[in-house]
Image: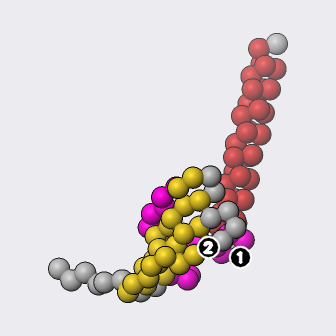
Amino acid sequence: MMEEMYGDFIKVILVLLGLLGCLGLLYKLVGKHRGGWISKGQGYGLRRVETIPLGYKKFIAVVEVKDQVLVIGVGQDAISLLAQWKKEEVHE
């Protein structure tokens, strides 16, 4: 009776380890092909610096695009460029 219980317990552990291994492989595959499915923005030199919420579906965002800094106002129906300047290089 106990031997059968231990055998069942080991089977459950092996199945769980197999599932974890499959999930790990799936995670690696998705990571390799992420650029085609989910854009990180790194290929465009795009980086969100800060977002300030103003209300329901309204916010101001500061975004760096390559060597430019953009201040963008986003509303429910429109996006507006509020300010733009060239990013300064910091020399120390």
Residue 68 versus residue 47 in the image, above or below: below
Which residue: 72% across, 59% down? 26
What is the CA distance from the residue labelled 2 to the residue labelled 1?
A: 26 Å
Q: In the image, 29: left or right of 4?
A: left
Residue 79 versus residue 1 in the image, above or below: below
Q: Give the residue number, with chain letter if any, for mark 1.
A: 36
Q: Secondary structure at mark 1?
A: helix
Asked whether residue 41 is drawn in magenta, I would say yes
Which residue: 62% across, 52% down? 56
Which corner quadrant of the image does residue 38 belong to?
bottom right
Which residue: 56% across, 82% down? 43
Q: In the image, 84: left or right of 11?
A: left
Please state the horizontal and vertical placement of residue 3, each as a whole percent of the image. 77, 19
Viewer can see residue 42: no
Q: Which quarter of the image is occupied by the C terminus?
A: bottom left
What is the magenta range? 34-53
Please state the horizontal and vertical placement of residue 64, each as a whole percent of the image. 45, 77
Q: Amino acid at mark 1?
A: Gly
Q: Amino acid at mark 2?
A: Ile
Q: Give the residue number, with chain letter if any, for mark 2.
A: 79
